[in-house]
Amino acid sequence: MSPGDVGTEGLLRRLAPQVLGRVARRYGDFAAAEDATQEALLAAATTWPVDGEPDNPLGWLIRVASRRMADRYRSEEARRRREDLAASWSLTPPDPAPARDDSLILMFLCCHPSLTPASAIPLTLRAVGGLTTREIAAAFLVPEATMAQRISRAKARLKASAEPFSLPGEEERPERLRSVLHVLYLLFNEGYATSSGPDLARTDLSGEAIRLARGVQAALPDDPEVTGLLALMLLTDARRPARTGPDGELIPLAEQNRSRWDRALIAEGVALITGALRQGRLGEYQIQAAVAAVHDQAVSHAATNWSEIVALYGRLERMTANPMVTLNRAVAVAMADGPAAGLTLLDGLEARLGDHHRLHAVRAHLLERAGDTKAAMVEFRAAAERTANLRERHYLTTQAARLAAG
C-alpha cells in the first residue's frame, strides 16, 4: 500500500476483514481467500490513487478477490473438473456488502490454538488489520521472505486443522477468546514498547491493536475482560505523547509532563474499566487497567496512590503467578514503603524471570534510591547490555554514566 496515500490505506485496512470474511465464507478456503484478498488490496492500492476510488469500494474488492479465487482454481490440476464452478464464481456478482461483520470470526481463526503468538500476530495483522507482508516484516525487523514463510506456515496449519469458518462452539469459545485477547495484548505491547530496533515505540502496531480491540469490544460489549483490555490499551496509550523527548529519547513515568497526556483517552478508559469492574467478574486485564487508571488520575508521580497499586498487583500476582507482575509490585512497594522493601521482593526473582534487562533496571533504580550508587551503576550497565531497543539502551547507559560521573 502506498505510504503516501493515507486515506486509501486507512480505507483498505478497514475493508480488509469484510472482504476476507465474505470471500472465505463463500468459498470455504481461508488460506486461499486470504491470498486473494491481499492481491485485491494491492490492486486497489495501485489503481485507486490513479483512476480514482470506485463508487462501491467494498464491492470492487470482493469482485477482484473472487476473480483471483477463480483464477487459482483454474490453474490447479483439477482445472477441468472445477472450470464450470470457477466460471460461475467469476461471473456471479457478489453482494455489495456483507450481510454480517466477520471480523470476530477472523480473529478467532487467526488465533487458533495450533498457532504460536509469533505466527498468530502476523496472520492477524494481514487478515484483520489489512497490512501487507512487507509492512509486517518491517514492523518486526525481519526480511520480507522470512515473514512470508511464517504467514504461509500459519495458514497451512489452519488449513490442516479443518477449522470451519464460524465462531467456535460455546464450550471452547472462552479459551479461544482468551487467545484472541492475548495476541492483541502482545501486539499492543510490541507497539508501545518495541523489543528491538532504533525506536522506542511503533505507533502503527499499538494503533492497530487498539483498532482491533475496539472491534472485539463492539462485538462482545458485555465481556468485562474484553472491555478491560481495551481500557488498558487506552489508558496506557494516553501517556504516549509524554513518553519521549524531542529527539525520541525515553522519558520515564516519574519525569513525564502530565499535561501532555491525552485526557480524552483517559476519560474513555476510566469509564470502560469502571463499568467492567462493576460486573464483579474480575480478570487480569481489568486489574492491569485499574492500575493504569490509578496512574493516569494522579496529579503527579509522588501523589500516586501507591498503596492501592500494591494491592492491585498483589491480587494480580496471586491470579497469574507472573514474575513480571512481581517485578512491577516491587516498584510499587518501594514507592509505598521504601526501596529496601522493594529490593527484598527482587530476591530470587532472577530464577523465575531470567537475566531480563528490566530486572536489572528496576534493581538499579531501587539501589540508587537506597543510596548505593556504585551497585546501581553496575546494574544500569547490565540492563543496557541486555536490551535490544536502542532508545532504552541509550537511557540506561546515560543513567550509568551519570552515576559514574557523580
Image (cartoon, rainbow, N blue to C red):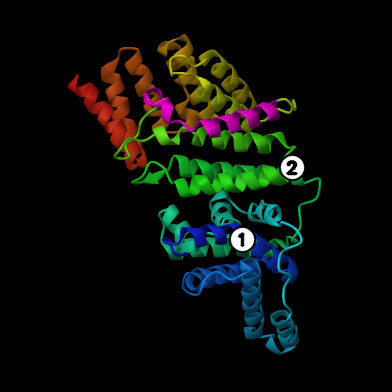
The residue carrying mark 1 is 15
> Residue farthest to the top?
337
Quadrant containing the C terminus is top left
* Residue at image coords 50%, 59%: 7
* Residue at image coords 55%, 69%: 53
The residue carrying mark 2 is 174
Question: Percent x, y for residue 59?
Answer: 66, 70
Question: Percent x, y for residue 329?
Answer: 51, 21
- Name the residue nearer the viewer: 19 or 226: 19
- Name the residue nearer the viewer: 224 or 60: 60
Note whether 302 is above or below 26 in the view shown.
above
Magenta-colored stretch includes residue 257: yes
Q: Residues within 10 Å of mark 1 (few under 14, many from 20)?
A: some
Is residue 324 at least partly visible in the picture?
Answer: yes
Q: Residues within 10 Å of mark 2 (few under 14, many from 20)?
A: few
Question: Percent x, y for residue 92?
Answer: 74, 79
Q: CA distance from mark 1 to mark 2?
A: 27 Å
User: Is 187 placed left or right of 403 in the picture?
Assistant: right
Quadrant of residue 83 within the rendered picture: bottom right
User: Is 244 placed left or right of 321 in the picture?
Assistant: left
Magenta-colored stretch includes residue 269: yes
* Residue at image coords 36%, 36%: 244
Circle 2 — which element? helix
- Which label was assigned to residue 93? none
Please name which of the two marks, 1 or 2, marks the residue nearer to the observer: 1
Q: Amino acid at mark 1?
A: Leu
Q: What range is drawn magenta here? A: 253-277
Note whether 131 is above or below 349 in the view shown.
below
* Residue at image coords 39%, 26%: 257
